[in-house]
Image (cartoon, rainbow, N blue to C red):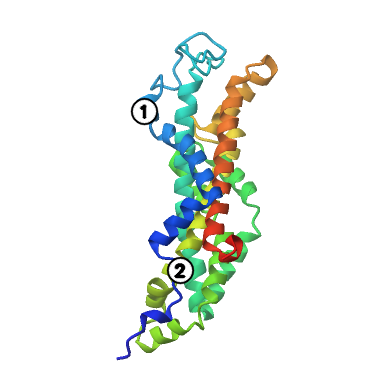
Amino acid sequence: MLRRPATLRTRGPRVPETLGLLAREKFFVGGLVALLIVVVPALLAPAIAPYKDFLATVGPIAQPPSWFGKYPLGTTDFGQDVASQLLFGTRNTLYVASIAAVEATLIALALGVIGGFLGGYVDAFFNFITNTFLVIPTFTVLLLIATFIKHPTLTLEAVIIGAFSWPWAARAYRSAAMSMRSRDFITVARLNGLGGLAITFQEVMPLLLPYIAIMFVLTLNGSLMADVGLDAIGLGPGNTITLGLMLNYAWGWGAVFYGWWWWYIFPTIVIILLTTSLATLAMGLDRVFNPRLRGG
Protein backbone atom coordinates (compact mmCIF):
# COMPACT_ATOMS: atom_id res chain seq x y z
CA MET A 1 0.00 0.00 0.00
CA LEU A 2 1.24 3.47 -0.83
CA ARG A 3 2.29 5.68 2.03
CA ARG A 4 1.40 9.33 1.90
CA PRO A 5 4.45 11.59 2.12
CA ALA A 6 3.98 13.97 5.03
CA THR A 7 5.26 16.85 2.92
CA LEU A 8 2.34 16.72 0.51
CA ARG A 9 -0.07 18.31 2.94
CA THR A 10 0.12 22.08 3.00
CA ARG A 11 0.55 22.58 6.70
CA GLY A 12 -0.11 25.77 8.56
CA PRO A 13 2.28 27.32 11.07
CA ARG A 14 3.51 25.09 13.86
CA VAL A 15 2.13 25.66 17.35
CA PRO A 16 5.13 27.61 18.76
CA GLU A 17 5.26 29.79 15.65
CA THR A 18 1.52 30.40 15.80
CA LEU A 19 1.67 31.36 19.48
CA GLY A 20 4.48 33.77 18.69
CA LEU A 21 2.48 35.37 15.90
CA LEU A 22 -0.56 35.69 18.17
CA ALA A 23 1.51 37.28 20.92
CA ARG A 24 2.80 39.90 18.48
CA GLU A 25 -0.58 40.63 16.91
CA LYS A 26 -1.94 43.77 18.58
CA PHE A 27 -5.55 43.19 17.57
CA PHE A 28 -5.53 39.68 19.02
CA VAL A 29 -3.84 40.73 22.25
CA GLY A 30 -6.06 43.78 22.68
CA GLY A 31 -9.23 41.81 22.03
CA LEU A 32 -8.18 38.99 24.34
CA VAL A 33 -7.27 41.35 27.21
CA ALA A 34 -10.54 43.26 26.88
CA LEU A 35 -12.48 39.99 26.76
CA LEU A 36 -10.75 38.60 29.85
CA ILE A 37 -11.46 41.80 31.79
CA VAL A 38 -15.16 41.05 31.37
CA VAL A 39 -15.18 37.25 31.34
CA VAL A 40 -13.01 36.48 34.38
CA PRO A 41 -15.11 38.45 36.92
CA ALA A 42 -18.26 36.93 35.39
CA LEU A 43 -16.92 33.41 35.84
CA LEU A 44 -16.04 34.25 39.44
CA ALA A 45 -19.47 35.77 40.10
CA PRO A 46 -20.54 33.17 42.72
CA ALA A 47 -17.40 33.98 44.72
CA ILE A 48 -17.05 37.75 44.29
CA ALA A 49 -20.60 39.06 43.85
CA PRO A 50 -21.71 41.18 46.84
CA TYR A 51 -25.01 39.26 46.98
CA LYS A 52 -25.50 35.71 45.78
CA ASP A 53 -29.26 36.21 45.40
CA PHE A 54 -29.18 38.80 42.63
CA LEU A 55 -32.98 39.17 42.59
CA ALA A 56 -33.33 39.80 46.32
CA THR A 57 -34.11 43.23 47.77
CA VAL A 58 -30.97 44.12 49.70
CA GLY A 59 -31.14 47.90 50.15
CA PRO A 60 -32.98 51.14 49.42
CA ILE A 61 -34.56 51.53 46.02
CA ALA A 62 -32.84 53.39 43.17
CA GLN A 63 -29.68 54.03 45.16
CA PRO A 64 -26.98 55.75 43.03
CA PRO A 65 -23.53 54.14 42.81
CA SER A 66 -21.26 54.52 45.79
CA TRP A 67 -17.96 53.28 44.43
CA PHE A 68 -16.50 52.28 47.79
CA GLY A 69 -19.77 51.82 49.62
CA LYS A 70 -22.21 48.99 50.17
CA TYR A 71 -23.70 49.31 46.67
CA PRO A 72 -20.79 50.15 44.33
CA LEU A 73 -22.96 50.20 41.19
CA GLY A 74 -26.17 51.30 42.89
CA THR A 75 -29.50 49.50 43.26
CA THR A 76 -32.54 48.96 41.07
CA ASP A 77 -36.07 50.26 41.61
CA PHE A 78 -36.63 47.12 43.68
CA GLY A 79 -33.56 47.57 45.88
CA GLN A 80 -31.57 44.88 44.07
CA ASP A 81 -27.81 45.18 43.86
CA VAL A 82 -26.77 46.21 40.33
CA ALA A 83 -23.19 44.94 40.74
CA SER A 84 -24.41 41.43 41.61
CA GLN A 85 -26.87 41.47 38.72
CA LEU A 86 -24.16 42.65 36.34
CA LEU A 87 -21.78 39.84 37.33
CA PHE A 88 -24.37 37.07 37.16
CA GLY A 89 -26.03 38.63 34.13
CA THR A 90 -22.76 38.63 32.20
CA ARG A 91 -22.11 35.05 33.29
CA ASN A 92 -25.53 33.87 32.10
CA THR A 93 -25.29 35.76 28.81
CA LEU A 94 -21.92 34.16 28.10
CA TYR A 95 -23.40 30.76 29.00
CA VAL A 96 -26.20 31.16 26.45
CA ALA A 97 -23.90 32.54 23.75
CA SER A 98 -21.28 29.81 24.26
CA ILE A 99 -23.73 26.92 24.01
CA ALA A 100 -25.37 28.49 20.96
CA ALA A 101 -21.99 29.04 19.27
CA VAL A 102 -20.81 25.46 19.91
CA GLU A 103 -24.08 24.06 18.59
CA ALA A 104 -24.01 26.30 15.51
CA THR A 105 -20.37 25.43 14.81
CA LEU A 106 -21.03 21.68 14.95
CA ILE A 107 -24.00 21.99 12.58
CA ALA A 108 -22.02 24.22 10.21
CA LEU A 109 -19.08 21.81 10.14
CA ALA A 110 -21.31 18.80 9.53
CA LEU A 111 -23.23 20.39 6.67
CA GLY A 112 -20.48 22.60 5.26
CA VAL A 113 -17.26 20.61 5.46
CA ILE A 114 -18.63 17.10 4.96
CA GLY A 115 -21.01 18.15 2.22
CA GLY A 116 -18.50 20.41 0.50
CA PHE A 117 -15.78 17.79 0.40
CA LEU A 118 -17.88 14.74 -0.47
CA GLY A 119 -19.84 16.59 -3.15
CA GLY A 120 -22.55 14.90 -5.18
CA TYR A 121 -25.99 14.28 -3.74
CA VAL A 122 -24.75 14.74 -0.17
CA ASP A 123 -23.50 18.23 -0.92
CA ALA A 124 -26.63 19.08 -2.92
CA PHE A 125 -28.89 18.05 -0.04
CA PHE A 126 -26.82 19.81 2.63
CA ASN A 127 -26.56 22.91 0.47
CA PHE A 128 -30.34 22.94 0.01
CA ILE A 129 -30.81 22.90 3.79
CA THR A 130 -28.25 25.69 4.22
CA ASN A 131 -29.82 27.89 1.56
CA THR A 132 -33.25 27.34 3.07
CA PHE A 133 -32.06 28.57 6.46
CA LEU A 134 -30.23 31.49 4.84
CA VAL A 135 -33.44 32.98 3.45
CA ILE A 136 -35.31 32.59 6.74
CA PRO A 137 -35.50 35.90 8.68
CA THR A 138 -33.65 34.52 11.68
CA PHE A 139 -34.53 37.07 14.34
CA THR A 140 -38.18 37.06 13.31
CA VAL A 141 -38.30 33.28 13.68
CA LEU A 142 -36.58 33.53 17.06
CA LEU A 143 -39.21 36.04 18.14
CA LEU A 144 -42.04 33.74 17.08
CA ILE A 145 -40.52 30.71 18.79
CA ALA A 146 -39.82 32.63 21.99
CA THR A 147 -43.37 33.97 22.01
CA PHE A 148 -44.87 30.47 22.11
CA ILE A 149 -42.55 29.10 24.80
CA LYS A 150 -44.25 29.58 28.15
CA HIS A 151 -41.36 28.71 30.46
CA PRO A 152 -38.05 29.38 28.67
CA THR A 153 -34.75 28.53 30.33
CA LEU A 154 -31.23 29.71 29.59
CA THR A 155 -30.31 26.37 28.03
CA LEU A 156 -33.43 26.23 25.87
CA GLU A 157 -32.81 29.78 24.70
CA ALA A 158 -29.23 28.84 23.79
CA VAL A 159 -30.36 25.77 21.81
CA ILE A 160 -32.91 27.81 19.86
CA ILE A 161 -30.38 30.55 19.02
CA GLY A 162 -27.77 27.98 17.99
CA ALA A 163 -30.24 26.21 15.71
CA PHE A 164 -30.48 29.34 13.54
CA SER A 165 -26.92 30.72 13.81
CA TRP A 166 -25.00 28.34 11.55
CA PRO A 167 -25.88 28.96 7.83
CA TRP A 168 -23.27 31.61 6.97
CA ALA A 169 -20.52 29.59 8.67
CA ALA A 170 -21.64 26.46 6.80
CA ARG A 171 -21.34 28.29 3.47
CA ALA A 172 -17.84 29.45 4.37
CA TYR A 173 -16.75 25.96 5.47
CA ARG A 174 -18.23 24.44 2.30
CA SER A 175 -16.20 26.79 0.08
CA ALA A 176 -13.00 25.98 1.96
CA ALA A 177 -13.63 22.23 1.81
CA MET A 178 -14.45 22.31 -1.91
CA SER A 179 -11.16 24.07 -2.63
CA MET A 180 -9.26 21.08 -1.19
CA ARG A 181 -10.80 18.33 -3.32
CA SER A 182 -8.07 18.39 -5.98
CA ARG A 183 -5.08 18.91 -3.69
CA ASP A 184 -2.19 16.45 -4.04
CA PHE A 185 -2.38 15.19 -0.47
CA ILE A 186 -6.08 14.38 -0.97
CA THR A 187 -5.23 12.35 -4.08
CA VAL A 188 -2.53 10.44 -2.20
CA ALA A 189 -4.93 9.80 0.70
CA ARG A 190 -7.42 8.30 -1.73
CA LEU A 191 -4.68 6.12 -3.23
CA ASN A 192 -3.95 4.93 0.31
CA GLY A 193 -7.51 3.66 0.51
CA LEU A 194 -9.01 6.31 2.76
CA GLY A 195 -12.72 6.97 2.29
CA GLY A 196 -14.40 10.34 1.97
CA LEU A 197 -15.34 10.72 5.64
CA ALA A 198 -11.92 9.55 6.82
CA ILE A 199 -10.20 12.09 4.57
CA THR A 200 -12.58 14.79 5.79
CA PHE A 201 -11.71 14.26 9.44
CA GLN A 202 -8.04 13.27 9.09
CA GLU A 203 -6.91 15.60 6.32
CA VAL A 204 -9.37 18.44 5.77
CA MET A 205 -10.47 19.31 9.32
CA PRO A 206 -6.93 19.89 10.68
CA LEU A 207 -6.22 22.39 7.92
CA LEU A 208 -9.46 24.23 8.67
CA LEU A 209 -8.78 24.65 12.40
CA PRO A 210 -7.57 28.29 12.10
CA TYR A 211 -10.61 29.12 9.98
CA ILE A 212 -12.88 27.32 12.43
CA ALA A 213 -11.43 29.38 15.30
CA ILE A 214 -12.18 32.64 13.48
CA MET A 215 -15.70 31.60 12.54
CA PHE A 216 -16.40 30.37 16.08
CA VAL A 217 -15.50 33.77 17.55
CA LEU A 218 -17.76 35.50 15.02
CA THR A 219 -20.58 33.03 15.71
CA LEU A 220 -20.14 33.58 19.44
CA ASN A 221 -20.47 37.31 18.90
CA GLY A 222 -23.61 36.88 16.82
CA SER A 223 -25.15 34.51 19.36
CA LEU A 224 -24.41 36.97 22.15
CA MET A 225 -26.15 39.78 20.28
CA ALA A 226 -29.14 37.54 19.53
CA ASP A 227 -29.45 36.65 23.21
CA VAL A 228 -29.24 40.30 24.28
CA GLY A 229 -31.83 41.25 21.67
CA LEU A 230 -34.35 38.61 22.73
CA ASP A 231 -33.93 39.31 26.42
CA ALA A 232 -34.03 43.08 25.99
CA ILE A 233 -37.50 42.93 24.45
CA GLY A 234 -38.77 40.67 27.22
CA LEU A 235 -38.64 37.23 25.59
CA GLY A 236 -35.92 35.80 27.80
CA PRO A 237 -36.27 33.35 30.68
CA GLY A 238 -37.79 34.47 33.97
CA ASN A 239 -36.46 34.17 37.51
CA THR A 240 -32.90 34.83 36.39
CA ILE A 241 -30.80 37.69 35.05
CA THR A 242 -28.88 38.39 31.85
CA LEU A 243 -27.49 41.56 30.33
CA GLY A 244 -30.51 41.79 28.06
CA LEU A 245 -32.94 41.26 30.94
CA MET A 246 -31.20 44.03 32.90
CA LEU A 247 -31.92 46.40 30.02
CA ASN A 248 -35.49 45.15 29.76
CA TYR A 249 -36.17 45.68 33.47
CA ALA A 250 -34.51 49.10 33.45
CA TRP A 251 -36.51 50.35 30.48
CA GLY A 252 -39.73 48.74 31.69
CA TRP A 253 -39.56 50.36 35.12
CA GLY A 254 -38.70 53.85 33.96
CA ALA A 255 -34.95 54.02 34.60
CA VAL A 256 -34.46 56.33 31.62
CA PHE A 257 -37.40 58.56 32.59
CA TYR A 258 -36.38 58.86 36.24
CA GLY A 259 -32.67 59.24 35.57
CA TRP A 260 -31.53 55.96 37.10
CA TRP A 261 -28.72 55.76 34.58
CA TRP A 262 -26.65 53.18 36.47
CA TRP A 263 -29.34 50.54 35.94
CA TYR A 264 -28.86 50.45 32.15
CA ILE A 265 -25.50 52.12 31.51
CA PHE A 266 -23.37 49.41 33.13
CA PRO A 267 -24.89 46.46 31.22
CA THR A 268 -24.68 48.53 28.04
CA ILE A 269 -20.95 49.11 28.63
CA VAL A 270 -20.39 45.38 29.21
CA ILE A 271 -22.29 44.48 26.03
CA ILE A 272 -20.19 46.93 24.01
CA LEU A 273 -16.98 45.58 25.56
CA LEU A 274 -17.94 41.99 24.80
CA THR A 275 -18.98 42.53 21.20
CA THR A 276 -16.07 44.84 20.43
CA SER A 277 -13.48 42.56 22.02
CA LEU A 278 -14.81 39.50 20.17
CA ALA A 279 -14.78 41.38 16.86
CA THR A 280 -11.23 42.58 17.54
CA LEU A 281 -10.18 39.07 18.54
CA ALA A 282 -11.54 37.66 15.27
CA MET A 283 -9.72 40.38 13.35
CA GLY A 284 -6.47 39.49 15.09
CA LEU A 285 -6.91 35.78 14.34
CA ASP A 286 -7.60 36.59 10.71
CA ARG A 287 -4.45 38.70 10.46
CA VAL A 288 -2.36 35.88 11.95
CA PHE A 289 -3.76 33.06 9.84
CA ASN A 290 -4.05 35.06 6.61
CA PRO A 291 -0.50 35.88 5.43
CA ARG A 292 -1.76 38.52 3.02
CA LEU A 293 -3.18 40.56 5.90
CA ARG A 294 -0.01 40.44 7.96
CA GLY A 295 2.21 41.13 4.96
CA GLY A 296 3.67 37.62 4.94
**Residue at image x 36%, y 28%?**
46
- Give the amino acid at mark 1: Pro
- Check the image and report above or below for 112 versus 56: below
Q: Quadrant of residue 76?
A: top right
**Dot placed on the residue nearer the N-terminal end, 2 or 1:** 2
Q: What crowding class fits label 2: few (fewer than 14 Cα within 10 Å), some (14-19), or many (20 or more)? A: some
Q: What crowding class fits label 1: few (fewer than 14 Cα within 10 Å), some (14-19), or many (20 or more)? A: some
Q: Residue furthest bottom?
A: 1
| Residue at the spot of label 2 | 12
The N terminus, quarter of image: bottom left
Residue 202 in the figure: left or right of residue 120: left
| Residue at the spot of label 1 | 46
- Closer-to-camera residue (170/239): 170
Residue 17 in the figure: left or right of residue 146: left
Q: Is residue 164 visible?
A: no
- Give the amino acid at mark 2: Gly
Q: Residue furthest top?
A: 60
- Closer-to-camera residue (152/217): 217
- Check the image and report above or below for 275 versus 56: below
